[in-house]
């Protein structure tokens, strides 16, 4: 489907996917930058740095490690300026060193910048610059940008940035200090996200809204190629041709408490506990007395829905597992051909799409590079594109035909939890909408689903109340080195999500398998040291999975089962079990996933892991 080569093969040095912040105004710049960088750490936390301008000098401080490590360094120096840029880094290639950390400068320090993205042609540009006598101190693509801009810049900063962007291939969001432009910060973006924050006597920029929520709720979203100049007096913007443009100001309704832990020891635990609220909010916007109503968001006519033949759902990570659950549900209530793919695979295959295709891109952030790339390819074929995202101003949301927003609020823990439930809820509603429009879902079925949907938040709360029981269980198994997760039907993707959560935050190897497939391989791994987590609610596949439990027991594997309340048979067949309230068969995933999230959380906590920022992971993966 796509002829693009892999950037990964061509770019030898740091692929950087990071958070950037910029501030100019009356406050202490280092305080604002460090605060914002803490809120962006979910984007990367290998190393961090800031550049503060104080009168004529620009001081740079960088540190390997987290923003708190940089904070210790900065607090001993107490920089006093009111203007600066900061960066928290996540490197996929190249060493994590203080030298490679941002900000980067040219040799004369005329240009100092922070960058999120990848410059694909940096080798070529570097060779040109070296030929003209420029020498480099790091091997990063970002230093190449700084050196190139320093060479280009004579006079007008905006013209220099227009020229710079004409020379760069790849993706970037940057905040830039130029020595001879004293009271300004410049920003430019293409591909990577960047928002501008408007204050009274101060201006901000950041990779994402949560970084700036304590300071402002008024944001400008830059489009590809846009250039911005930030000063204490306000913000000016230009398009990629250097023509002055005015941009809409959007007021966000997120509150700063949404990005605080509110007494919880970790964001992940707070977010797990928010899931009943997420479900309520998702429904109250989309269900009324006549049933499911998505007309405010989906302006697809009945004729267009009738003409559809297939639904392609494309996503990465947890969003992919939510999509797999939704695939099975949609199959049950529509006559459409549904398929789900991992974005990084889908984009390189020859999959036929066209006007008869509804393409649904599921992405919490709306910025995942592979999901965006897949969307751009599919859109060209005439398919109707929908984004299911938590960020209605994300790049994905702005490129698709329709947006279905998750009502999750900001999710800070790197391991997705409440956005998983939010995605499931929205995708189920989309399925109900399609079934209703195509006449494959009867009114009584719709009523049955919607009324049980309304009960789910209460049922989730009863599971959350079992946190102590789940903590004790988790601690009992926390020293195991391997886990197998099993499930059938709708519970198979839940097994995958449960295994993913455990891997991500506790670093224990966990493999998920379709229960019926266990005997074709993973059964060879089983012994008394390998706990098997089985998701087996009372649905039409219950008995089949029970047989698989017997097979695992016969190999002496300890069984931990997630079951429906009152299922005594399953209890007898397990070392330990956690029960969830009974619900409609198709809705069990909303409940069975909760004990698995809590289990992973308490295992990781017992092992002393960094739960909100697990090693090597980033929440928003904006590179291939
Ligand atoms: C990263 C995150 C995951 C997330 C995945 C997809 O791997 O660590 O939690 O599920 O990206 O992100 P998206 O924003 O597209 O849902």
Image (tube, helix red, strand yellow):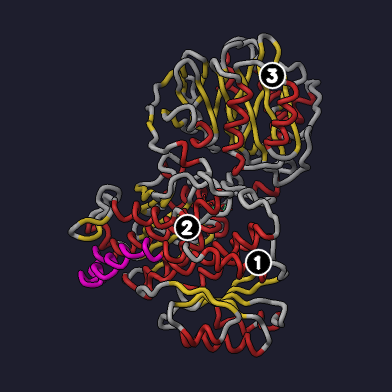
Callout 1: few (<14), some (14-19), or many (20+) C-alpha neighbours within 10 Å?
some
Please say if 63 is above or below 445: above
Mark 2 vs mark 1, foreground winner is 1
Q: In the figure, is residue 134 to the left or right of 241?
A: right
Q: In the figure, is residue 285 to the left or right of 39?
A: left
Q: Earlier in the sequence, mark 3 or mark 1?
A: 3
Residue 448, given in percent of the width and then of the height, sits at 26, 70
Q: Which residue is disc 2 drawn over?
A: 420
Q: Earlier in the sequence, mark 3 or mark 2?
A: 3
Q: Which residue is disc 3 drawn over?
A: 79
**Alpha-carbon span between mark 3 and mark 2:** 41 Å
Numbered badge on residue 213: none
Q: Which residue is disc 1 drawn over?
A: 475
Instruction: Say which element carries label 3.
Output: loop
Residue 623, given in percent of the width and then of the height, sits at 61, 45
**Along the viewing direction, whichever of 334 and 240 lies nearer the viewer:** 334
Please say if 139 is above or below 311: above
């Amino acid at each position: 489907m796509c002829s693009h080569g892999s950037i990964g093969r061509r770019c030898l040095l740091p692929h950087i996917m990071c958070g950037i912040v910029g501030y100019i105004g009356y406050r202490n710049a280092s305080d604002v930058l460090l605060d914002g960088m803490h809120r962006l750490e979910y984007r990367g936390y290998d190393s961090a740095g800031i550049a503060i301008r104080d009168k004529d000098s620009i001081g740079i401080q960088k540190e390997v490690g987290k923003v708190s490590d940089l904070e210790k360094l900065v607090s001993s120096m107490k920089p006093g300026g009111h203007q600066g840029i900061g960066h928290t880094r996540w490197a996929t290639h190249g060493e994590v060193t203080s030298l490679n950390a941002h900000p980067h400068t040219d040799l004369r320090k005329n240009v100092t910048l922070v960058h999120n993205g990848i410059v694909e042609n940096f080798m070529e540009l570097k060779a040109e610059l070296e030929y003209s006598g420029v020498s480099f101190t790091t091997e990063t693509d970002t230093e190449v940008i700084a050196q190139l801009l320093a060479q280009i810049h004579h006079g007008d900063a905006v013209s220099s940035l227009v020229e710079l962007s004409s020379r760069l291939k790849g993706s970037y969001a940057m905040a830039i200090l130029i020595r001879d432009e004293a009271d300004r910060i410049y920003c430019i973006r293409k591909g990577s996200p960047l928002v501008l924050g408007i204050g009274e006597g101060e201006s901000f920029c950041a990779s994402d809204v949560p970084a700036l929520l304590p300071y402002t709720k008024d944001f400008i979203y830059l489009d590809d190629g846009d250039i911005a100049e930030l000063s204490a007096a306000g913000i000016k913007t230009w398009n990629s041709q250097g023509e002055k443009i005015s941009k809409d100001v959007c007021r966000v309704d997120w509150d700063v408490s949404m990005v605080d832990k509110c007494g919880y020891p970790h964001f992940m635990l707070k977010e797990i506990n928010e899931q009943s609220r997420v479900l309520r909010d998702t429904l109250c916007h989309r269900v009324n007395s006549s049933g499911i109503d998505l007309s405010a968001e989906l302006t697809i006519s009945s004729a267009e829905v009738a003409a559809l033949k297939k639904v392609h759902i494309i996503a990465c990570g947890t969003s992919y597992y939510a999509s797999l659950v939704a695939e099975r549900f949609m199959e049950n209530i529509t006559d459409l051909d549904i398929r789900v793919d991992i974005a990084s695979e889908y984009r390189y295959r020859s999959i036929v799409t066209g006007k008869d295709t509804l393409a649904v891109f599921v992405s919490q952030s709306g910025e995942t590079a592979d999901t965006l790339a897949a969307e751009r390819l599919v859109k060209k074929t005439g398919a109707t594109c929908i984004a299911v995202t938590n960020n209605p101003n994300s790049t994905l949301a702005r490129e698709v035909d329709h947006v279905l927003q998750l009502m999750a609020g900001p999710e800070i823990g790197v391991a997705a939890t409440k956005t998983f439930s939010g995605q499931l809820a929205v995708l189920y509603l989309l399925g109900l909408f399609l079934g209703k429009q195509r006449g494959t879902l009867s009114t009584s079925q719709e009523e049955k689903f919607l009324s049980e949907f309304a009960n789910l938040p209460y049922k989730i709360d009863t599971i959350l109340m079992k946190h102590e029981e789940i903590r004790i269980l988790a601690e009992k198994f926390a020293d195991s080195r391997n886990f197998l997760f099993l499930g059938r039907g709708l519970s198979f993707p839940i097994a995958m999500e449960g295994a993913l959560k455990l891997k991500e935050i506790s670093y224990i190897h966990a493999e998920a398998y379709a229960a019926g497939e266990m005997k074709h391989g993973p059964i060879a791994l089983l012994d008394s040291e390998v706990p098997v987590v089985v998701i087996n609610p009372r649905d039409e596949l219950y008995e089949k999975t029970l047989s698989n439990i017997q097979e695992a027991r016969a190999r002496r594997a300890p069984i931990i089962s997630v079951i429906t309340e009152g299922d005594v048979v399953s209890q007898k067949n397990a070392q330990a079990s956690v029960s969830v309230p009974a619900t409609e068969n198709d809705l069990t995933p909303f409940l069975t996933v909760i004990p698995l999230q809590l289990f992973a959380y308490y295992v990781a906590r017992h092992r002393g892991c960094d739960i909100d920022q697990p090693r090597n992971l980033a929440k928003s993966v904006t590179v291939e």
